Amino acid sequence: MAYPLGWSVRLQVVVRRERWPGGSRAGAVALVYPGQMVEPDQPVIRLKREEHGEELAGLPRLSLPAVTRKLPAIHPTALALPALGEETVPAGLRGRVVDVTARGGVVIESQVVAIQGVLGAGPQVAGVLTLWQALGNDGSRSVQPIPPGAILVVPGPLSFLLLRHALNSGVVGIIASSIVLRDLEGFLHADLLELVNSPGGEDLQSRLPPLTIMLTEGLGSLAMPARLLQLLSCYQGRVALLSGFTSVRRHALPELLISLTAAEAEALPSQEPDLALVPGARVRVCSGDYCGRTGEVLSLFLHRQRLPSGVRAQAARVLLEEGEVIVAALSCLDRIG
């Protein structure tokens, strides 16, 4: 899917996605049929696994509370078979089922808000969007209880300790601005370059810790743009579908999909916004010392300007969200609104 704006957000778009929890599944059975309408928290796939012994193909923990039941007891004279349990996979999207794949996956068509990340890891999960509050109301540090099955939204950079806290709390996914490489590889127990360049990326993803990660800014210590955080806060408490799969070979990036109601779809603009860099346009700096910062174009220079690098280029005067005014080359600015 094409993201025309620099901040990688589509406010309204129709997508088709296969709901599949990742890995290899020998016992996946679709619970819906083509043409059926589904809700985000509705079970659409049933997975069978062994309760005794190893789980099938490294089955990850499922998103949202699972439905588990045991089959009737086997008669003593019957063949000795392992006891089986069943778990269900929620849709994560609101929309119409258009296909059921050979492996038991369910393809759903939905009208969504789509947000693309820069870097991520982990299989597809569905969960309730929950904002993380690092500080209490009085400014003191507090340990926030995290509901299990949530997709946690962290405004700032991630840390190894926060990732471990989220994992131990039963969180299925986490969206944050950035993280230092050492903490990310330490949590994943994997080499990042190998992970994103491997031809068998999906198999490697299923062996990672059961916590899907999406970074909106990438590696480092950049904060999440205020406009993006505000957008995510508008959908707090909604069930969303998150994929952390990142592959250089497949040109795949992590993605968050939030289904819209019919009323929301009518209220949101359907036309693509203007991409021209003009005074008053909201922009994001895509390179240099201010990479990742957002602001508003105050004015455009009529003539080429000499930049700190010594290069002369067409430039604009930009007021950053923090109140600082900078001069940036037009080629380093992406319009986001």
Image (cartoon, rainbow, N blue to C red):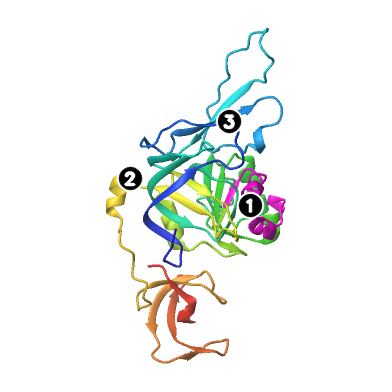
Question: Circle 1 — which element?
Answer: helix
* Left or right of residue 46: residue 193: right
> Is residue 209 one of those drawn in magenta?
yes
CA gap between label 1 and label 2 equals: 34 Å
Q: The C terminus lies in which quarter of the figure?
A: bottom left
Count residues near mark 1 (Cα–Cα under 10 Å), then give few for <14, some for 14-19, many for 20+. Answer: some
Which residue occupies 51% across, 72% down?
286
Question: Circle 3 — which element?
Answer: loop
Taking the image as drawn, is residue 135 in sight? no
Q: Name the residue that disc number 2 marks.
A: 261
Q: Name the residue that disc number 1 marks.
A: 201
Q: Name the residue that disc number 3 marks.
A: 27
Which residue occupies 54% across, 45% down?
124
* Left or right of residue 199: residue 173: left
Type of the residue with mark 2: Thr
> Is residue 101 one of those drawn in magenta?
no
